[in-house]
Amino acid sequence: MSSNLIFFTKKQSNKLLYSEHLKNKDFQWLYDLLEKDNHLTTARIPASKLTMLSEMHDTLLNKSMDEWIQHKSPNGQHIEDRGEDEGKWMHCSLCNKKNRYIYYIKNTVNSVTLNVGSDCITEFGSLAAGAQSGKRMLQNNALRARNLQKLLTVIPGARKRISDWSKFVSDLAIIPPFTVTKEYDELGNDAELLYEKILNNNKNDDYIRNLQLLFNSADSLQTDILEYINKNKHRKFILTKEQAHWIRTNQTEHYTQILELVRKSEYGLISLQSAKLIRDPHFLNTFMIVYNTKIMQLNDDIWHKQELARNKYISSGNVQFENEFPEITDTTNGTFTYKFRSLTNIVFKISSTKFISLLGFIVFNSTINHNNSILRLIMDSSIPDVQSSEAMFYQIQLIFDGKIIFNEFQPAFQYVDFAFLVKSSLDTSGVKHYTHIYKRYNSNDFISKMSTVIFRKNKDALKKYLDAECLNTYSESEYNSAREFDRDLDIARRNTFTS
């Protein structure tokens, strides 16, 4: 298909824009395109939608046509002759050309009134007796227009009610499960079929009566649905209309999947499966509160043992530190910041998706195999600030009872230094002196590989790493010289950035 091909003429574009059919959620994107360019070419249409739109081309025009009925002009005429004086001719609402003969039509859904020229009235089929159209289409459109007039006389607002059928559900305060709206949705399909039968048949009195009965049933179902909504709208982890809107706006790629998972659940609740996908701030804040409340009880035993180990009543080797659940301290932009009581002054950051995937079972009471979930959580997390990194390195000092001392962390140069006690001695005055060697390690590698080991207080694994992964070893004098050199290098680096 040529990219220069006009997909909708100016007349067709304006007809669609003045109609209501394009304003539903499935065609809002097309409405936005037509508003910008009413000479819409195939090149302006997204490639992923072009085939579907090509198949829907005639259907869209016919659907928009069905919304219109004849309407009287200010002079009480359906068709107005403006006379031979071109100065008195009126601009057509579709093509903007001046016309002597003006047809007046009204949209039954949005009440928009148009004045349409004798050439453009053909865009509305049967609404103009003189419109040039295929005989079969003209007869069919004429029949549909007459029957629509008849239907609206018997059941005012019938067309708008059918077009707005799904709007009732989408406007509810919370997202209901499919089971609650299933019967109402099915009635909507039946109403659409009845509506088409009414428009396409001369003998349609029974269809009109059946449609009225169907509307009565729908009224009753709406009452039941609203009662359900009022009863359940305060449930925890219900998905509200506002949350659904946030997800649709900010998580377009997951919106359909999340909505389907929620609507398939028993009460329309967010489950572990859907929670992993949701980044809505209100939901994440609620999750944080519920999660933190639940871990208080779950951590009671491990916190007690940690306290005993801290006060030397038991060996830290008898404490399974990896059984401690972390506390979430903040949620921002789809991430959680969390900490452990056993790792003082250290915070971790991870996406809410990963956190909920690993520990969401606590909130949603899911029975899953969560062995090593906390260790995997730490491995997938980042340490977001220098203070937390330094606190992590300081843990080495605690684990080795001061025999290994955290000395310096240089994030700009990605290294960390520790002082290792070699010996201690007393001088003649009785003053104790300590001799150290200094070892340097890659700080990024250290945190990446040793965070879980430090968390578990695994002294043997730490010693093995410290022995094997050292970048440099210094005596006291060598280390002081190296630090002096590094300070000069850092000053030069800073001056380069600020000059």
Image (cartoon, grey):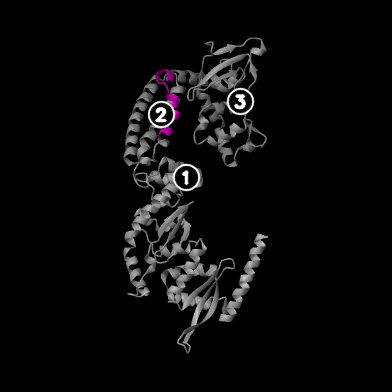
Q: Residue furthest bottom?
A: 428
Q: In the picture shown, does residue 254 fall above or below 195?
A: below
Q: Residue at x 34, y 59 (%)?
A: 296
- Residue at image coords 57%, 39%: 49
Q: Disc 2 and disc 1: Cα gap in Å?
A: 31 Å
Q: Earlier in the sequence, mark 2 or mark 1?
A: 2
Q: How many marks?
A: 3
Mark 3 or 1, nearer chain start: 3
Front residue of this view, candidates 188 and 174 = 174
Q: Quadrant of residue 232?
A: top left
Q: Nearer the viewer, mark 3 or mark 1?
A: 1
SS for callout 3: helix
Q: Which residue is mark 2?
A: 191
Residue hosting label 1? 247
Q: Which residue is mark 3?
A: 11
Disc on the earlier residue, 2 or 3: 3
The quarter in which the N terminus is drawn is top right
Q: Position of residue 394 (x, y in %)?
A: 47, 70
* Highlighted range, magenta: 152-168
Report the magenta stretch's main SS. Answer: helix
Q: Is residue 155 magenta?
A: yes
